[in-house]
Amino acid sequence: MKIEFENLGPLEKGELDLSNLKNLNVIIGPNNSGKTYFSYFIYAVLKIFYENIGLPKKIAKSLLKRNENYYSEELLKELPIIFHTNEKKFENTKINISLDITDKFDSVDFENTSKIFGINNIYFFPAERSGAVLFYKQLFQSGNDILRKFELSRDVNILKDVSNYPEPINEYMKFLNRNFEDRNETEIYKNVFVNIEDIINGEILVRDDKILYKNKKDFELEMGLVSSTVKTLVGFYLYIKYCAKEGDIIFIDEIELNLHPRNQLALIKLFNILTKHGIKFIVSTHSPLIMQEINNMILYEEKKKNSNIEKVNIEYNVNQNYGIDKDDINVWFLNDGTVNELKVDEEGVETSTFNKVVAKMNNFYQDLYFLDED
């Protein structure tokens, strides 16, 4: 499914080809360039046309018609709901959807379609995740109270106080309010728990309907007392521990949020491990360190058959699973109102938006250091 769009928030024009969705999809660009808007848009498309394709019978039946205009209209109608904003925000938005041969639904069994695209579930971890973990219960209860008042009074004015957060944030709130205590640990968690527990220096527990953090000395803390790193990663930890399955698609906004450089690199390595378990990622970042680590993984994959690679493995404590194939990476660069897919080759991807800033900073230091006195 190829989607062309115009006037999507700060994005004047762009293109999205979901048939080209890779294991690791990275969104980069300056502040206020539309990265969150673009993430929400991809999320909307996947939620409407992929994850739930077999549920709404009206949509399911219409898919047989293969009417591409219909899909565009459906998506436009859903955008104000996903973004939780006024319809006028999208009155100038234009969407054109073209179906690929893999999107033809003639032989689809509409009674059992949850995995016809290889997608299991979709999870979104928003940039607001570190604050949400402190107030998720109060906000969830507040929403329930408002709906109860409406049920009793039928006064529509009451509904104006219902959450006005975009759908990805609301979904994250609901995720944190799940009953995790009755769930078993996933097989994926059993394979990677060492990696994520090394990042947060402990583990996340759920006891008596409370999310708790236990450090490596077995000292337990409630979420109001933990570090920003733990608050940022608690939802992702719970996902891996209790929900992770092959076919999941994970969105994470600003993956470097509150993370020391060491943990930024550890997290992107964890993502790479998880892609090998069949999980896809769509993430945004401002971190040149993360992009350099991705380039390192791409170049390693190209060089791992080199006879001297064992020296690198020992010196940098990596193994053959460290690398990632260049064909498993997408990088979208958002700038000046446009979306551009960057070229990824055997040496990685050129990210001039970071490189120019870093180079200027380093040059400034060098010029100061060697500055001659009069």
Image (cartoon, rainbow, N blue to C red):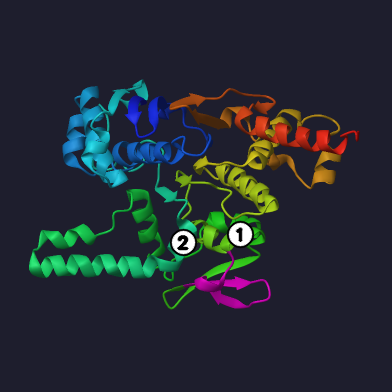
- Magenta span includes 13: no
Q: Residue at x 85, y 30 (%)?
A: 307
Q: Residue 210: which numbered mark, if any?
A: none
Residue at image x 39%, y 37%? 42
Q: Quadrant of the N terminus?
A: top left
Point out the frontmost of discs 1 and 2: 2
Return the residue nearer the eye: 147 or 374: 374
Query: How far from the left and from the top, in percent, is residue 263?
Result: 66, 53
Q: Secondary structure at mark 2?
A: helix
The boundaries of the magenta stretch are 211-227
Residue 127, visible in the rendered structure: yes
The kind of residue on which mark 1 rests is Phe
Q: Which badge, 1 or 2, comes first in the chain's sequence? A: 2
How many numbered dots are placed on residues in this image? 2
Residues 96 and 299: in front is 96
Residue at image coords 33%, 25%: 6
Q: Is residue 67 visible?
A: no
Res. 68 image quadrant: top left
Task: Describe residue 10's horizontal placement relative to residue 359 as left or right.
Answer: left
The image quarter in which residue 290 lies:
top right
Question: SS at mark 1?
Answer: helix
Q: Position of residue 285 (x, y in %)?
A: 55, 41
Q: Amino acid at mark 2?
A: Gly
Cβ atoms under marks 1 and 2 closer than 8 Å: no
Look at mark 2 in the image and give the residue it sits on: 131
Q: Which residue is farthest left?
A: 154
Q: Is residue 372 above or below residue 159?
A: above
User: Residue 61 placed where, x, y %?
Assistant: 17, 33
Query: Residue reaching furthest front?
Result: 374
Residue 217 placement, left or right of 21: right
Residue on which disc 1 sits: 193
How packed is label 1: few (under 14 Cα within 10 Å), some, or many (20 or more)? some
